[in-house]
Image (cartoon, helix red, strand yellow):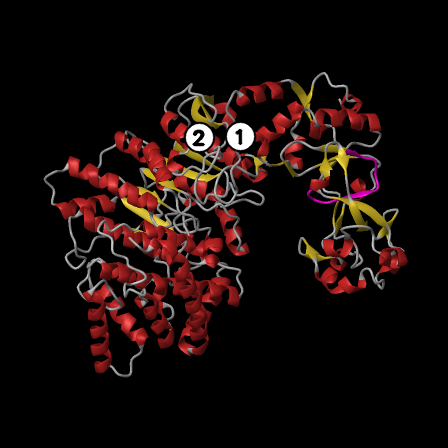
Amino acid sequence: MAVSTGLTAALKKVVLDLEDDLRDRVASQPEVFKAWDTEWRIAVGRERTAMSWQEWRDDRVTQAAVAWVLTTVFVRFCEDNRLLKPVWIAGPADRRQEALDAELAYFRAHPEDTDREWVLQAVEYLRNAKATRDLVESHSPLWTVSPSGQAAKRLIAFWRERTAEGHLVWDLTDPDLSTRFLGDLYQDLSDYAKKTFALLQTPEFVEKFILDQTMEPALAERPLEGFKLIDPTCGSGHFLLGAFARLNDRWAAHAPGMEVQARVQEALNAIHGVDLNPFAIAIARFRLMLAALRAADLSSLEQAPAFQFHLAAGDSLLHGQPQMALDLPGMEDYDAGLSGFAYATEDLAALRTILEIGRYDAVVGNPPYILPSDPKVNAAYRERYSTCHRKYQLTVPFMERFFRLAKPPSGASPAGWAGQITSNAFMKREFGSKLIEDFLRKQDIRLVVDTSGAFIPDHGTPTVILVGKNQDPQSSTVRAVLGGKGEPGEPDDPALGKVWRSIEENTSNAGFENAYVTVVDLARSALERHPWSLSGGGAVDLLELVNSSSDRSLGSVTASIGFAAVTGEDDAFLSDGVAPHSWHRDHVPVRAYVDGESVRDFDLRGKPAAYPYINGAVVDDLGTSSTFWPYRAVLRSGSAFGKTREGMGKKWYEYILPNWPRLNAKHLIAFAFVATHNHFALDRGGKVFKQSAPVIKLPEGATEDDHLALLGVLNSSTACFWLKQNSQSKAGSGIGRGIQPEAWMERYEFTGTTLEDFPLPKASMLRACLRSG
């Protein structure tokens, strides 16, 4: 196919053009504006969203624009591959002229219509054909607003562009009917949608591995009849397509005499998918439709039956009855009460059926790795999922959701399997503690694979693969593929990368070890407490030895660990070089300001900072100084925890969050929040430490020698090892984060919460520790 290179980038511009047009169309059509405004107001009233009208409108405009563009992609694919008889836009060779003739005849019969109505002729044809009607069903964003005639004319012109030789620029002809290019469109067609929905397609080699570890053992335990699989975050449908191909082959072997279309439908009946993004569902449906067409040995969609697909657009975390409501009377409509209502793009009845708790033999997917951005939705997730803790990622509630969708054991019926590739941040960051200690420890985890060192295209976040069953733990060990060296370079074929091949070829081989992975049967108890360590080469055993050699933690002997001050507006308080003359003229006190990058090799290096305090009290006459007066608007409007400086009883030119015990301390130990190694340095007072350079404050009475003794322990190689095992990696190999062939190149996030658990040696010379004991 000659379309892949450049098509996505070109269509992005078309989407942006349509967005501008549709935004105007919403505003200029009273009936459309009223419908949109009403839906937004109801969504806000039912606490389904906290978006402003403009944000909400723009989000829906993007969905509609992408829907119109994708519909023309579907039409063009059908035209070029002769899947439908009529032609509306273009086509290879004689089909292009056929489209122009059909368009001319239409406008002769309908002289008042525009190019919009001509495009709608293609849409209506899809809606009337039994095989394609679901592509443009009533819940499609296509029907929320239509483009102007001029915008539709530009959309058609895009597809009719020709090269100097007279060939179509965008030719979608493919004898194999491959739809892989639609995955690229799904991921990159809209920058806004990619960021908002964290759009990310799963590579086929990862999808294959997870299906091998979940779907295959699930099928080995139960009959093929009635088997059900779901991807609650299905995106453009990679897992669904892979599962369909396997199930279709199994049905062919299981029932060779079955009529082929009936066999294909049996395979489709097992496949279920939900995604928050409506155009993801549209792509997944189109791809499954073509896969079914090929499996049924058909070459025309007009010959195809009305294959049934179990797909729906909606929020998998909100719709469907939650586990906690199963046994409570009067909770039958819980999902409607929580989500408020169904958007026009959501089929509530389908979502309730598909997202039924305990329904599936296998649950697979690649959930989004982002934080919930809408405060109302965030609150709804917290109410619904007990694992949501602190500033959690969506990986947390989705982990719970995956397991809850799987069947629990019942009599002779085995429990369902759940498998996913997800961000590994929950393993070490504090927000993952409830997930691990309150939820996962009660699940039958079967496999944990550290994939952070593997080169996985487009995955800019270190990941882990986790597989288990929705039942109580059944053994004292868990198969674990622990990580070693990262991928030494970008492989030509990511599926053949050294790290990935080590994982794929040796997961079943306990005791295998090379430079990249170590395969072990890990004691389940090691995964029952937060944080997790999945480092190979004996690191797990060494970590246990370090922990067992201590009788107290750092947190037990410190007064506090954390930031010393948050200015709230660095531009107003900091200087890159020497202190400006105006500070001296205005008699502004000055301190050294230290950030995380300035804490290195036992040393501190700071730059000048305006410090509007003397002996802990704010200087009264600085409000009219030339130092702060130019910043008065931004400083007065700045807030922390929902309050401005003046709302907290401070002067408007103060630091927004000063920590006085730490700012006034005579001695502190500062460290780099993000670094490749442990960097701790002694401060003898008189500095301001940024959030990226947290500090350790010992109790009153601790001497400088106490601080120096602790400093030696914290800068030791043992401390470096422990911190790396218990801290979240900020790097790894992959697109968007580079190649880290050596372990020392990885950066870690060293948090105060992690440091509180640092085990101090029993035979310590720390007098502060001895006094506290």
- Under mark 2, the amino acid is Val
Residue linked to disc 1: 532
Query: Which label belongs to residue 269?
Result: none
Mark 2 and mark 1 residues within 8 Å of each other at the beta carbon: yes
Quick check: is 8 in the magenta stretch? Answer: no
Quick check: is 686 in the magenta stretch? Answer: yes
Helix or strand or loop: what does disc 2 sit on? strand
Q: CA distance from mark 2 to mark 1?
A: 11 Å
Whole-percent x and y of residue 265? 20, 47
Residue placed most toward the observer, 527 or 1: 1
Q: Which residues are magenta?
A: 682-692
Viewport quadrant of the C terminus = top right
Examine the image and state in which quarter residue 209 appears. Answer: top left
* Residue drawn where x is 47% and y is 57% of the image: 191
Residue linked to disc 2: 448
Tell me, yes or no, if residue 750 can be seen here: yes
Horizontal side of 168 relative to 449 (left or right) equals left
Helix or strand or loop: what does disc 1 sit on? loop
Horizontal side of 261 relative to 764 (left or right) equals left
* Residue drawn where x is 18% and y is 39% of the image: 251
In this view, the residue farthest toward the front is 165
Residue 98 sits above or below residue 770 on the image: below
